Image (cartoon, helix red, strand yellow):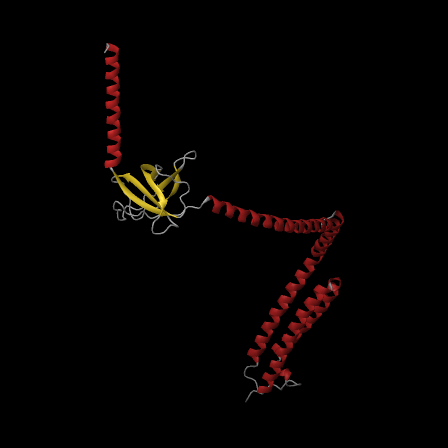
């Protein structure tokens, strides 16, 4: 054997030993430090043996078998091996997932809860079904059909609303047109002029009526105090006088309303009210000085001084 042949044989032997060592180490690592689990799904979604198992998004093992369950063929039994000491617990949930958009299906397991009990090797991991492509497509078809009906209905309602809006805008344009604006402006100017002219007269008349009302109230009180010790007929007459004064007060209030309604006769009305006020003052003064005149015609003679 030549030297080159010996060197070649030696190199091939070294590569063989290295490959055997690597294969042994990989098998030892994957076989001796993984634990089995299983889970069940109704829809596997193209999951195949050798697919990745992700725990909280971290690679922790691989799927070893995907097959219909023996006890219930309507379910898919998925066997998987994960790294030892992976904290799978009773709150962890297995479901279909993807490592990336371009990769195939994977089995994703949630982290669950730190307080939950840890799952023993060979236990069943709780699962959550993922929607299949057919289900998603059917739901999208239903949504599309409903959207078409809704769009048709909305289009009809929008046409009606658009017509009503055009009518409202046309009415607003007619109401707020320039002719109506001029009429409203002229009306407001007339009202302002009338208020400016008649307001002083009305205020003066109101003040006089208030003074007259206060004076009438004081008169009634004075009359009541004066005849409090007189005979019952006098009290009755005074009560009637009070009613008369109240009626006069009501009459004055009615006259105030009448004056406001007939502002063009305010001057004549004020003169008449002034005369009525003077007569009422005279009557009040007479009652104060001679209250007995309400029941007697002549003044009684002065009593003689005893000798």
Image quadrant in which the C terminus is located: bottom right
Corner quadrant of residue 106: top left
Foreground: 215 or 176? Answer: 176
Count how many numbered circles sit on residues in the image. Answer: 0
Horizontal side of residue 15 vs 76, given as left or right = left
List x then y, in percent, for residue 212. Answer: 63, 69
Instruction: Indicate the position of residue 209 as horizontal and vertical percent values.
Output: 65, 67
Observer-nearest residue: 35 or 199?
35
Image quadrant holding the N terminus, namely: top left
- Asked if 61 appears above or below 190 in the picture, the reply is above
Relative to 188, is 270 above or below? below
Judged from this view, the residue extending furthest toward the front is 1
| Residue 277 seen in render | no
Q: Position of residue 81 (x, y in %)?
A: 29, 40
In this rendering, is residue 104 above or below 209? above
Q: Is residue 66 visible?
A: yes
Query: In screen coordinates, is 84 left or right of 184?
Result: left
Q: From this view, report whether residue 298 is shown above or below residue 61.
A: below
> What is the x, y in percent for residue 42?
40, 48
Residue situated in front as seen by the camera: 67 or 79: 67
- Residue at 67% from the left image edge and 63% from the top image edge: 205
Specify the quadrant of the image occupied by residue 86. top left
Identify the residue shown where x is 62% and y is 69%.
Answer: 213
Q: Closer to the camera, 259 or 89?
A: 89
């Amino acid at each position: 054997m030549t030297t080159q042949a010996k060197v070649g044989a030696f190199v091939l032997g070294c590569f063989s030993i290295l490959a055997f060592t690597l294969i042994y180490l990989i098998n030892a690592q994957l076989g001796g430090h993984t634990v089995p689990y299983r889970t069940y799904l109704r829809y596997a979604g193209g999951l195949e043996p050798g697919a990745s198992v992700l725990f909280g998004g971290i690679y922790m093992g691989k799927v070893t078998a995907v097959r219909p369950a023996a006890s219930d063929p309507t379910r898919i039994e998925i066997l998987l091996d994960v790294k030892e000491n992976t904290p799978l617990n009773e709150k962890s949930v297995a479901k279909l997932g993807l490592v990336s958009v371009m990769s195939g299906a994977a089995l994703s397991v949630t982290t669950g809860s730190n307080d939950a009990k840890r799952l023993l090797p060979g236990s069943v991991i709780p699962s959550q079904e993922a929607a299949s492509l057919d289900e998603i497509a059917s739901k999208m078809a239903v949504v599309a059909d409903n959207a078409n009906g809704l769009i048709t209905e909305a289009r009809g309602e929008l046409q009606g609303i658009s017509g009503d809006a055009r009518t409202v805008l046309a009415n607003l344009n007619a109401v707020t047109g320039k002719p109506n604006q001029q009429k409203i402006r002229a009306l407001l100017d007339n009202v302002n002029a009338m208020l400016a002219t008649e307001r002083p007269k009305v205020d003066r008349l109101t003040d006089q009526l208030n003074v007259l009302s206060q004076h009438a109230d004081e008169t009634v009180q004075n009359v009541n105090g004066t005849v409090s010790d007189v005979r019952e007929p006098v009290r009755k007459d005074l009560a009637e006088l009070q009613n008369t004064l109240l009626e006069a007060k009501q009459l004055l209030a009615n006259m105030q309303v009448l004056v406001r309604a007939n502002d063009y006769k305010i001057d004549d009305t004020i003169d008449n009210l002034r005369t009525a006020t003077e007569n009422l003052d005279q009557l009040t003064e007479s009652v104060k000085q001679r209250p007995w005149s309400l029941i007697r015609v002549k003044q009684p003679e002065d009593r003689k001084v005893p000798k």
